[in-house]
Amino acid sequence: MAYQDIAVAVADTVCTITLNRPDKLNAWTPRMESEFRSAVQNASQDNGVRAIVVTGAGRGFCAGADMSILEAGVAGDPSADDASAPVYGEGEGIDANYAHRFSYLLRVPKPIFAAINGPIAGIGLCMALFCDFRYMAQGQKLTTAFARRGLIAEHGASWMLPRLVGPTQALDLLLTARPVLTEEAAAMGLVKALPQEGFLGAVQVLAREMVHTSSPRSIGVIKRQVWDSLFQSLDEAWRQADRDMVASFGCEDFREGVAHYLEKRAPAFTGR
């Protein structure tokens, strides 16, 4: 598929999705929304991909929604696409929680790494909140932005942020919308900091090492367990884990996990 607002590359089982509007600090658009979701779905279904890394082209990660689109919406232009319009999918029961604009990322059975190479704000930050890991280059800035634009906490931010950093830190980030440097964001547990030099390559190495040393099947099941547990009681999570463990005993990756340990060699997991 030909993309305009993103770029996609796969190398050694890692799919890198690059938000690709560097002249606009990769500001979010409806086209970027559609292309990004398509690329994630394709990577999710590709047996040659075991991890996904999301980053930005140029000096920014994502400056938030394209302000020219928001301005057109404020002006009442009916032809203006709204980069902040609600996006819902279909789902019942626990699956309904994964049917929103970015929450579907939690259901992708592969780890997703946000490689925050530059400034990140608004909807760009919201997207990164729903990635499994957030690495941020040293010396960069993030902001929720919404309160300083007369808006509210959108796209699940008011739900996810408290779960990542606690209610007090979340309220600080959301109510002040102040710029936060990488080092402070790392101290509160929102991101992990890495040096600016060689940043993207370092994140790709971390992703590759994770999926080459651990079973892809185990990674997918454990990721589902962790995110589902936010909507379950302990009893429900425990019983599901028992069922998942029984299923694991019959899979190829379990047999390989035991074999490579006993034979003292690198694993050759298939994901089955």
Image (cartoon, rainbow, N blue to C red):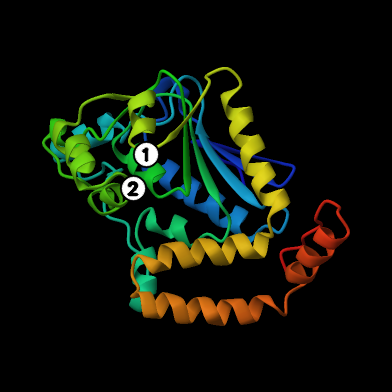
Q: Residue furthest left?
A: 150
* Distance Cα–Cα, label 2 vs label 1: 6 Å
Could you say whether the residue bearing mark 2 is in a helix, strand or loop? helix
Please state which of residues 239 and 108 is positioned toward the viewer in this rendering: 239
Mark identifier at residue 236: none
Q: Which quadrant would residue 97 be assigned to in this image?
A: bottom left
Residue 72 appearing in the image: no
Name the kind of residue labelled 2 in the image.
Leu
Q: Which residue is mark 1?
A: 190
- How far from the left and from the top, in percent, is residue 231? 33, 69
Looking at the rendered structure, the secondary structure element under dot 1 is loop
Circle number at residue 164? 2
Q: Are marks 2 and 1 in contact (CB under 8 Å)?
A: yes
Q: Earlier in the sequence, mark 2 or mark 1?
A: 2
- The C terminus lies in which quarter of the figure? bottom right
Among the 4 quarters of the image, the one containing residue 91:
bottom left
Identified at 26% across, 30% down, the residue is: 67
- Identify the amino acid type marked 1: Leu
Residue 244 vs residue 171: left or right? right
